[in-house]
Amino acid sequence: MEIDTLKIAEITRKDFPLFNNQPVNKEKLIYLDHAATSQKPIKVIKALENYYSYTNANVHRGAHQLSAQATEAFESARSITANFLGAKSSNEIIFTRNATEAINLVARAWGDYELKEGDEILVSMMEHHSNLVPWQQLASRKGCHLKHVGITKSGELDLNDLKNKISHRTRLVSLVHISNTLGCCNPIGEITDLAHQYGALVLIDACQSLAHQHMNVNSLNIDFLAGSSHKLCGPTGIGFLWGREKLLNEMPPFLGGGEMIEEVFLDKSTWADLPHKFEAGTPAIGEAIGMGAAMQYLQEIGIDKIHSWEQHLTKYLFNKLKSIEGINVLGPDPEIKSNRACLATFYLKNIHSNDISELLDSKGICIRSGHHCCQPLHRYYGISATARASLSFTSTIEEIDYFIDELYSIIKFLKNNS
């Protein structure tokens, strides 16, 4: 599929049923909530349909040909995921229920057995709750300490603060790659080099980056990565953990049950080899196959072309938002920091973000409002909620113009009626 970057939305929108026949309150649908969940192309929907229609069987366990076909498709999805990340082996890909479970897996299978009282974990103030709560729980269980790296005035990770807080007691640095609220892209390579100098491991929450820019786990030199299917045009209900094979081999299982065993006796069990050691029970087979189809779809378009188009859209969106009096936009300006997420999180004093979101919805425009699972970050800014418009490669200039026009009218209405 050879696609002109400037025509990427025009060419790809036809692949998404939702964009072609979905009026909302008799208004054309404008979906600007891609950071919450992505829409699904026909290729992914067909992959799910084909599995459940023609290849529905459990994997790894059956001797019959239907099970063999299902197993082949399921394990092919694992290989596709490994290739998508630049992993050295498909054994490094652990399928999980979502990215949250992937982070919890590391907290339990690595943290519970490796950390001791007095050890330290570094996270940032911008973390999604899924990359904060598991470490709070681990710190409580093990008596270790959680340190929080601050942010700069421009809404980026404060590297000086990180350098001041990291020490030889630091065992893990767990950070979001791209913030779902600030939109900043953290310098993972630099952070990893620093962490490894102190003997600490690095885990990256890549949920907001995998569908938007090229990533290679070995080039980044990280140790763990958590990803989510539904953020990259795949089905819900499945995510994955990538980890260095040596680390995964050393870690005990997270869950016990079928599939993750080698042998079971009445009083003891032995564990299967990677990756099955961490995949107890029947997996989300169709969802894994659908996720593999989504990754292939993105690769066919070209991740670099997606990134280029989304950068263009982001600059256009920010310039339009700046024209609205009284609006405050969080995170770095794309004119200054071009490598940032294709989203804009904003608020206005004395106007609740939920009111903005609900009135936009009446016009067929879907955006997000609330704390975006980042309550500590919102407390830092002294606000309870923000609104967020998030784009994708299917977004268009015309959609942004319509959104801005309606947003302007709604803000004017709310101010006049406050």
Image (cartoon, rainbow, N blue to C red):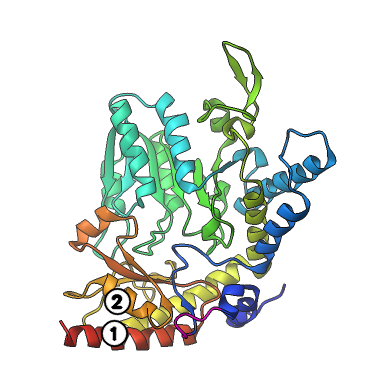
Q: Name the residue located 62 percent from the left edge and 41 percent from the top edge.
A: 283
**Pointers 1 and 2 in contact (CB under 8 A)?**
yes
From the image, tell me which residue sits under label 2: 356
Amino acid type of the residue tagged 2 in the rendering: Ile
Q: Is residue 127 magenta?
A: no
Q: Specify few, some or many for label 2: CA neighbours under 10 Å numbering under 14, 14-19, or 20 or more.
A: many
Amino acid type of the residue tagged 1 in the rendering: Ile
If the image is split into quadrants, where does the N terminus sit? Answer: bottom right
Name the residue furthest top: 267
Q: Specify few, some or many for label 1: CA neighbours under 10 Å numbering under 14, 14-19, or 20 or more.
A: some
Q: Name the residue located 20 percent from the left edge and 63 percent from the top edge.
A: 383
Q: Is residue 254 above or below residue 356?
A: above
Image coords of residue 385 (percent x, y): 25, 64
Image coords of residue 264 (percent x, y): 63, 17
Image coords of residue 298 (percent x, y): 63, 64
- For mark 1, give the secondary structure: helix
On residue 410, the disc is: 1
Instruction: Confirm whether residue 71 shows in the render.
Output: yes
Q: Give the magenta part as a residue range.
A: 22-27
Q: Name the residue located 48 percent from the left edge and 53 percent from the top edge.
A: 206
If the image is split into quadrants, where does the C terminus sit? Answer: bottom left
Q: Is residue 101 above or below residue 371?
A: above
Name the residue furthest front: 25
Q: Nearer the viewer, residue 272 or 149?
A: 272
